[in-house]
Each structure stands twice: as C-alpha cells, then as structure tokens.
C-alpha cells in the first residue's frame, strides 16, 4: 500500500456525524418514470448504465436488459431468453463499449458473452469463456479487453479474484488478486447482489466482498485506488474462526463480532467518494472529499 495514488481511509480517526444534507451534494433531483409497453414488465432494477441519451437497465426478475431514453420512453430489449446463439438463459451482468458501439452481456449459466449493437440491440456474435474451473458473474469492458470476476468450487491458495479475457476468443490473458492475500481466503460461489465492478466509467474499479482495498484497472494492469484501515478490521483469522460451514453462516457469526468489513455501495463522483462498510449489524456511511483530503462517517 505504498502507492502514492491510493487513498487511505482510517476508520478509527475520522469525524463522526449524525446526518448529511443531500443538498450539499446535489443541486437538483429529477425523477424518471419508465414508460414500458405491456409486454415489458420491470420487476426490479438491478443495475443501470448510461450512454449518451440512453439508459440500459438490467432486471434479473424478468431476466432481461432494456433500453430507455432519459425521458423514460422505452426503446428496445437487448436479446431474449433462450438457447439459440443470440439468446441467453441467465444474464448476470453487462458492460458497454461506447467506442465501438457494442454491449456485452454475460450469461452466467452458459458462461458465454453475447455481443449486441448498442444502438439497435441487433445481435453480433458470442464469446465462450474458456476455463470450466472458473465461474464469472460480473463483466467489465476496458480498452479493448474484457474483465471478469472469478469464483471457484473450493477455496485454494492458488485461487484469484480478477482476470482479463481476450475479447475475440474468451481466452484468459492475465489474472490478479490472490484470494488468500486480498479476500481473507474466500473465493467461493456467493453473490451479494452487488456489482463487483464499482465504477463503469473510463476508470473501472473492482473489489470483492471481503476486500479492504478497491483496485483500479488501467493500461498496465491494476493498482490500489482506495483502502480502509482500522484496528478492528476483519482479518483472515477472524473469517476462518467464524462459526459456520459456509460463507452465509460465517457472515452471520461475524455480525456478533466487533469487526469492520465489506466496502459496499461505492460511488465516485468528481471530488467526492461515498461508500458503506459493515460493523456488527450496522452499516456506516463514509463521505470522502478527495480535494480536501477530508472524510467523515455517518453512524446508523
């Protein structure tokens, strides 16, 4: 963590407040009411990505990806359910290539990526992921490559958390982040419902569920972007000693321990960073001003 570009947030010395006025962050708020046709039912908005005047919405209840304009008017559906080459069974994530005007949809069940035209939704081709021992749930396009998370059937000291794929063949080019070093040894199949790629802009960010560090993806590979520290930060031993035979049971056990863990709901906007972390049964909200190098915590 000697990287000079990495923000270090010491959770033990930050200023603690009871409230934050949203007017100090946003000047105006405008609701967008989605006007979809009768055959397009939005059950739950799991993720939103924006390109020019379009919004792309993933709804995992209806297993679909839909595009709307910024006035909420329905434009089209990207792909559909099925087992044909242009179809998917369980779309788990998607990413946009705004330079080449493509949208990549990861089908978790089939471990393949379908490629569509970003404007028309027309199918282009698909990419089959090459390693059956690794399962991927989240995907990110950056600078001509695709990046995915990595999950394994069993925890192992050789397991990694992030990999780069060849965009033409789906072959793994590089991998990073030892699970034993960065994620308390955990690399199993568990989905929190949260995106592991925390930023979808020209500076993609990645962090797994138990990581203390958020990594930035760049031309050279990856580097630390932000890290949290505390005398009561969750350790690999804390996780190993937690009661339970699986991840869910261990996390429930940790709810009774006075340890801090799990960076969640990360937002990076201009000079401000917002995120949450967990301690016991409570989530605390961190507000960090990058320009002033000042941060505060809102206790819940």
Image (spheres, rainbow, N blue to C red):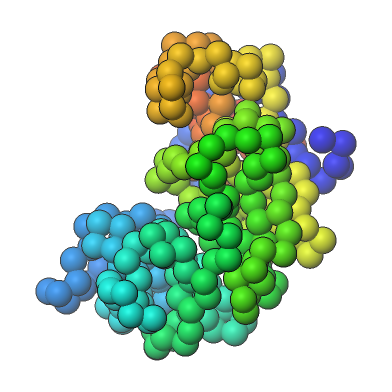
Quarter of the image with the N terminus in it:
top right
Q: Position of residue 189 (x, y in %)?
A: 46, 42
Residue depicted at x 66% and y 56%: 163
Residue at point 35% right, 71% down?
Answer: 88
Position of residue 277 measured from the top left corner of the image (x, y, whole percent): 53, 30
Q: Position of residue 35 (x, y in %)?
A: 21, 72
* x then y, percent, for residue 136: 51, 55
Dividing the picture into quadrants, the one containing residue 66 is: bottom left
Residue 102 position (above or below residue 249): below
Left or right side of 61 for 290? right
Is 229 placed left or right of 41 in the picture? Answer: right
Q: The C terminus lies in which quarter of the figure?
A: top left
Q: Is residue 38 left or right of residue 8?
A: left
Q: Quadrant of residue 259?
A: top right
* Residue 39 in view here: yes
Identify which residue, 19 or 98, lies in the foreground: 98
Q: Is residue 45 above or below residue 55?
A: above
Residue drawn at x 53%, y 75% is 127
* Rendered position, 81 above or below 284: below
């Amino acid at each position: 963590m000697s990287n000079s570009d990495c923000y270090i947030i010491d959770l033990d010395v930050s200023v603690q407040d009871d409230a934050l006025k949203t007017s100090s962050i946003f000047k105006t708020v405008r609701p967008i009411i989605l006007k979809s046709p009768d055959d397009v039912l939005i059950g739950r908005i799991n993720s939103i990505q924006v390109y020019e005047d379009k919004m792309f919405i993933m709804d995992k209840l209806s297993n679909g990806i839909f595009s709307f304009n910024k006035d909420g008017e329905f434009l089209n559906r990207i792909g559909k359910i099925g087992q044909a080459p242009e179809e998917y069974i369980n779309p788990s994530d998607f990413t946009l290539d705004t330079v080449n005007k493509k949208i990549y949809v990861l089908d978790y069940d089939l471990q393949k990526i379908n490629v569509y035209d970003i404007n028309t939704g027309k199918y282009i081709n698909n990419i089959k992921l090459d390693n059956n021992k690794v399962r991927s749930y989240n995907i990110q396009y950056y600078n001509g490559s695709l990046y995915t998370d990595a999950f394994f059937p069993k925890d192992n000291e050789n397991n990694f958390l992030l990999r780069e794929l060849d965009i033409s063949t789906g072959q793994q080019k590089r991998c990073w982040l030892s699970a034993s070093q960065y994620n308390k040894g955990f690399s199993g199949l568990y989905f929190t419902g949260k995106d592991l790629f925390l930023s979808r802009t020209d500076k993609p960010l990645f962090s797994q569920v138990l990581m203390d560090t958020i990594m930035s993806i760049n031309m050279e590979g990856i580097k630390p972007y932000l890290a949290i520290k505390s005398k009561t930060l969750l350790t690999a031993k804390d996780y190993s000693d937690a009661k339970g035979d699986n991840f869910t049971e261990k996390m429930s056990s940790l709810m009774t321990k006075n340890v801090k863990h799990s960076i969640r709901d990360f937002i990076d906007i201009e000079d401000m960073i917002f995120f949450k972390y967990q301690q016991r049964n409570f989530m605390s909200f961190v507000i960090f001003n990058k320009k002033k190098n000042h941060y505060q915590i809102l206790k819940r």
